[in-house]
Structure formats: structure tokens, C-alpha cells
Image (spheres, rainbow, N blue to C red):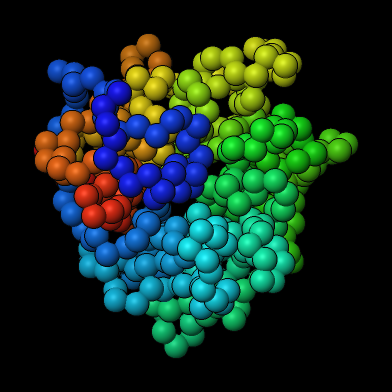
Amino acid sequence: MKKLHFHFITLVSVIGLIACGTQARKPHENLKSARIDSIGVRFEMITNAIEAPIEMDVSPDNTNRNFITDNAGKIWILKNDSLLAKPFFNIYDKLGEQDKKSKIGSIFSMAFHPQFSTNRKFYVCYNAPSKMHENICKLVVSEFTASKTNPDVADLTTEYPVLELEGKNSKDNGAQIAFGPEGYLYISIGDNKGSDTSYKYRAQNLHFLNGKLLRIDINKTPYAIPADNPFVTTKSARPEIWAYGFRKMWHFCFEPGTHQLFGADVGEEKEEEIDIVTKGANYGWPAKEGDSSFEKSVLNNASAYTSPINAYTHKDGICVIGGNFYYGKDIPLLSNKYVFADFNGSLFALMKNAQGNWTRQPLKVHNRPADPLIICGCNVDGNNDIFVMGFLNTKSGNKGAVYKIVKG
């Protein structure tokens, strides 16, 4: 293996954020050259002023604002591809400054209430302190409200905790929150052991929230269970659960036309996977990892598990990030395809062929930056342009970066 030029401490922090099970390695060191059938694109730098950009969400109030989640405790506004000087949300204004090694204050995701334009409500998934003045985390999904007088600033005094998760590794198992087309809030929670050898996987146990995709109604206090959730009448099962058997579904999206839910589940040792997630389905972790077996001590009944629509080994990537469907006009070759990223800087398009099978196609970036790029997020804006977020590994340290993908 070639000598790595990463700044080790920062890189380990980033890997822990997404819970990649793979060893740290230089982006692209395992990638083959782009195939003839690859799609050519280019990167357009939007901003390098955000410390740890991992997600972008479009404001539903027709103000042409994109909100970028900064894992380092902030949410920023990007308006007309320009970053506003002051963050919309800074969790440390509420928690106070933390030790640099602390994961308290890490933000994983945000979601706007479907009626945000009138009620100003939004939701944030972040690590909160379990006890005051202690460096112990709990995972929290909280409701906040934007300021009445300044829509570009959040009112942190309005926080209302909706759901909390405590226990081993809860600090590393935050992923994404998003509202579905029916108006319910979906919450992805990981089942990652990290370096804890005593951790017991919970993804197959319906009594725990780890390794699950949840679905709740936040229009009740603190929330209600939708009547059609699959396990509402199952004894000892948490009624919030919509689907299960995930290691860590870092990012998911709803296809605009069919409303199908596409999720990117991060692997541990062998494979990364893309799933179509359906009501009550079991995706196999930890018995399965992608199309491979993982933990043989778990009952491995192949008929009980829903297989991924696409999986790839660590020869093609190291940690799936996920993405969105592209319905823009600028890059016709990507139209109607699920465009997603891998942590090592790779980009792919997923589409269904004439035989009904999902096939993966690489994207070739013609102006890839000189410094290695780590991708932590891949989303579309209101114009259906694709953005990737992450880090550049420069000689002076990691530098946050947000790029728009444009025609090659």
C-alpha cells in the first residue's frame, strides 16, 4: 500500500462520523481507470468555507435557499450558490463550547417540516450531552423553529426533544432524518460497534431502535405512531420501526415519481449496498452484508432478507454515501438515474436496464482536484443540480468543500 498523506487524527474522525468499517486508505487507490461507458462530468467549486459539510436540504418555502449541514455543529444557508456569512443554526450557542475531542454537538442531519413556510418548524439530529458537564453523548432528534423576525436565523430557545437514544455507541449511530411524501418523519439509526468489541448488534432485534429505519408522526406531542406502521401490533417490537436489518443507512431519498425509498447502507468489511426500502422488510444485517454473509452466529435465512438492488466490494469503493435521483436538464446522460457517491471520492449512476436489473455506471470527473477528495454527502437542490460535500486532504490539513456537478 502506498504511503498515506492523510492527517490521521482528522481522517479517523471523519471515518467514525460515517462509520466506515474499512481501514483508512487513500481515495481511489483501489479504483480501476474509468471504463469506456463512464459518464463525464466536472466539479464546480461552490464554497470551501464550511468545516465539515455532509448534507444539503432545500428549503420548502420557495426562497431559493439550500441548507448545508455542518457536522461540526452548524447549519449554513447557501442562497444563489453564495454562502451567507452567519450560520442559520449553531448548536454550541445552546450547549456551550466543547472539548475538541468531544462528539457532543455533532450534527448528522436536518429536515424541514412540510409546512415550514407557515409554521417555521425544522428538525435536527445531533449528539447532545447525556449529563451536564460530562463528555457522554445521547442521540437526539429535536424540533426547532426559525426566528419570527429573521428567517435566516434559528431560534434555539424553541428546542423541543422528539426522540432520544442512549446506550453504547449512540454517539456514532446518527444518520439521516427526512420527511416522506405522506408527511411522516423517517429516522435512520445505525448499528455500528465501532471499536467496542463488547457491542451486541441489535438490527435483528425489534425491541431496539439500532439498525432500523423509523417512521413517526411529529404532529402529535411528542410524536404518534402512524396506524399503518408494520409492527404496531407485534408484541415486544418498537412500533416506530418501518424497516430493519441495517448497519448504517447513512443517506436515503424518495424517488419523486414513484415515492420509492432508496437507501445507502454502509458496510463493515466486504460490501456496500443500495436498497429499495419497503414496509416491514428485513435487510439482513448482521447476518448479511450486501450480498455476502457477515456474522454466521445470526440465523441466516436467506428467504427472510430483502436483497440490495446493487452491491459492490471494496475494490470499487470503501463506504457508500448515497445520493438522489437526477431530473435536471444540464446532464442528459444522468437523466432519471440514481446518482450516488462513495467516501473515497467515487461517483456512480444507478439505473434499471431492459431486463429489469439495476446496473451501476461510473462517473468520470474530468477536473478532479489535485488533493484527495473525501465525499460525505450527495444531494440535489431545487433546480435538480447535484452537489457533493466533503473534505479535501490538503498538506495543511482537511478542508471542507462543496461542489456542484456540471456537464463534463
Q: Residue at x 74, y 56 (%)?
A: 224
Observer-nearest of 216 and 362: 362
Q: Report the side of 248 relative to 401 (left or right).
A: right
In the image, farthest residue toward the bottom? 149
Q: Residue at x 37, y 57 (%)?
A: 52
Q: Is residue 74 above or below residue 156?
A: above
Give the percent coordinates (x, y) of residue 180. Answer: 54, 49
**In this view, 312 is above or below 326:** above
Q: Is residue 254 visible?
A: no
Q: Is residue 40 above or below residue 396?
A: above
Identify the residue at horizontal 49%, vertical 85% (top origin).
148
Residue 381 appears in which quarter of the rendering?
bottom left
Of the 4 image quadrants, the one containing the N terminus is top left
Residue 282 sits in quarter: top right
Query: In x, y percent, where is residue 91?
Result: 51, 71
Percent across and percent down for residue 181 are 53, 49
In this view, the residue in front, 16 or 151, is: 16
Question: Residue lying farthest front?
Answer: 3
Question: Residue at 59% across / 81% down in the picture?
Answer: 157
From the viewer's side, name the closer residue of 73 and 357.
73
Q: Is residue 404 left or right of residue 126?
A: left
Does residue 55 appear to the left or right of 33 in the view shown? right
Q: Is residue 82 visible?
A: yes
